[in-house]
Image: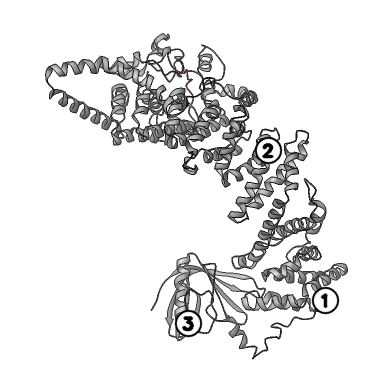
Amino acid sequence: MSDTRRRVKVYTLNEDRQWDDRGTGHVSSTYVERLKGMSLLVRAEADGSLLLESKINPNTAYQKQQDTLIVWSEAENYDLALSFQEKAGCDEIWEKICQVQGKDPSVEVTQDLIESEEEHVEEMPETSPLIDLPTCELNKLEEIADLVTSVLSSPIRREKLALALENEGYIKKLLQLFQVCENLENTEGLHHLYEIIRGILFLNKATLFEVMFSDECIMDVVGCLEYDPSLAQPKRHREFLTKTAKFKEVIPITDSELRQKIHQTYRVQYIQDIILPTPSVFEENFLSTLTSFIFFNKVEIVSMLQEDEKFLSEVFAQLTDEATDDDKRCELVNFFKEFCAFSQTLQPQNRDAFFKTLAKLGILPALEIVMGMDDLQVRSAATDIFSYLVEFSPSMVREFVMQEAQQSDDDILLINVVIEQMICDTDPELGGAVQLMGLLRTLIDPENMLATANKTEKSEFLNFFYNHCMHVLTAPLLANTAEDKCEKDAVVGSTKSNTICPDNYQTAQLLALILELLTFCVEHHTYHIKNYIMNKDLLRRVLVLMNSKHTFLALCALRFMRRIIGLKDEFYNRYITKGNLFEPVINALLDNGTRYNLLNSAVIELFEFIRVEDIKSLIAHIVENFYNALESIEYVQTFKGLKTKYEQEKDRQTQKLSSVPSILRSNRFRRDARALEEDEEMWFNEDEEEEGEAVVPPVEKSKQEDDFPDSYEKFMETKKAKESEDKENLPKRTSAGGFKFTFSHSAGAANGANGANGKSVAAQTSPAGSNGSSSKTATLSSAVTAAKGSLVGLVDYPDDEDEDEEEETSPRKRPRLGS
């Protein structure tokens, strides 16, 4: 006895040939004594009542559809269906049915339907029509409609009806009756014709579609489908197709066959998408051939256009011609967008040939021109075309831009045009910028770069990208964390809005996108991004954004640092400790107070990673410089754990020293304290340049860190009005005039005034023996000097509204560093 239960919906077919939902329950196959055989039982999941009890008859034809449906007929006009929630449940019940009938479970129909039909049609000659169609007359329309709708549940009867309709030219006769009914305003007849034509479409036969969608018949087919009996008034689909919808020829198409195919495809797509109701779960397969019909039409259109090189050459010529007016260019770009969309229907080898044809004709130089235009619609369509090309072959795009770099200035390189479009996206939600960022990420992803015996695409392209494009990508980031802006903001009593941590949500979103791309580079580009970070002192500039009032932006900055530390690269670790770059992170943790939010968790996770991985240089730096400020945090054991690791390492070093003869220990100690430190500093500052020269060409000196494209200047200027409106809402300085970040190693700290405000955290919390490194160390060659005793003068931003609510429940706040 089997008692496998699965969740199902039970459906029955009503008199109108529509499926009615009888309820949801659990199905089992079990032996029922009363029915003398294995039966399907469905009990309602709500109250356990019996929804279905059906004996598995050895001669009943069961059909399995779409992996989760089992359909069968128990009487001439009583059809049943079980719709399973899970494929596994359907498979189990199907196996039970096949077991009872002695069939292989791999079949989709358990009985030969022709045999069951032949029980009712005794030894009918093969040449005889399988279904007798009523004569095509007005008074027979109801009979014809009943016949068409009655066969839809039986695959073999659908085949017989389709054959009869095809052989007798019946469809054209029906469409003639439609014209008669419409002239006579015979509403009842028109309603019957709607049911007939809809039913014929559901027969799913390509040979019938060829007749129905011919130029001669298609508008009458659309006319029949206007008279849906469920609508009070008929729709006006023919009026839309003939008067509203206009066929635009960007370049005149001389091939009449191609024009006819384009018209037909548009109209059939309209029938499928607009006129026909959304098919039910049982009707989805009824229109599979209609979908295929449209698919193959599109393939044929693309192939015919692709073979007409004269046509495509003319399109490209007009697209790139400066004399072409804006409306015409918009139509040309939209044509290419739709052309590329159609190409997705091609087989891989044909699609390969298609895009190679476009590349040969100059699609990329053309895109470079139109993506830089002012028309938003043109740029959007060009971006879609570019996405098709990048998705198809990133290597093709990379090869083009590297060849282009040998002949063009950086400002007009295709990738720089894409970056500038991302930076200057006017959409408040930056929808276009997000799309472009994804394309850039694909282009700089080493995983899809080729390596051959003659050349390595990865090294060539990344050298190109970091020399010619990276300064454009980071321009907004460097511009919004520039030192000269800090100095302007540090003027006492200044009411100028602070642009370091922009309050403007759109700008914050843009910086977050750039940081996401830079974080990807840290993970995948190894020495290229390392060289760039060192030369530009990029991590320090990124960590300025830890003070943003937009928590998502602060988290992006923190994630960038977390990826760097996650590499466990001692070169990065020395850069972080020499630059005292944990300070803004710890300031953010302390300013967050006792609120256990995402920022709090992310910062704790960063330090926990350092503890678990036992990164000794970072542990020593954190404990020696910041432990006094962090020891009060006891709800996690992370910081106490760091102190324990630090002390254990100190004990190990002491034990090593005690095992060395005293005279050697004396010499060694002296070198550790003086000579070694100076040697290491020289190595760190000099070797950084050596590495850049050894592994990657240094960043061009002409690219100053606060240089950014003119387009970005325009972009920022357009925001001035918006930002000036928000000026009243900008956060003010703290009452003491203090700033969040102070860096003792910077030149500004050495010259700093402002008394207490110019002091560093390290100066307050470091052990006496560690004062050398933070005061002596020169900043990296590309680092900016600090302003007023700190690298950046940051105003004390108010918290987000949701954080204000948390603050009400958390009145006590941990002291911030430097307080």
Q: According to the image, label 3 marks what residue?
A: 101
Residue pushed farthest bottom?
A: 122
Q: Main secondary structure of the magenta part?
A: loop
How crowded pointer 1 is (Cα within 10 Å; few <14, some 14-19, many 20+) is rated as: some
Q: Is residue 233 above or below residue 372?
A: below
Q: Where does the image place residue 648, in percent across and percent down from the top left? A: 20, 30
- Taking depth in this image into account, of 392 and 162 the one nearest to the observer is 392
Q: Is residue 512 above or below residue 169?
A: above
Q: Is residue 327 above or below residue 732?
A: below
Left or right, 267 with respect to 452, comes to right
Q: Where does the image place residue 94, in percent across and percent down from the top left? A: 47, 74
Q: According to the image, label 1 marks what residue?
A: 138
Q: According to the image, label 2 marks what residue?
A: 366
Left or right, 447 with respect to 259, comes to left
- Taking depth in this image into account, of 11 and 463 the one nearest to the observer is 463
Q: Where does the image place residue 316, in percent across and percent down from the top left? A: 72, 41
- Please indicate, yes or no, whether residue 741 appears anywhere in the rendered image: yes
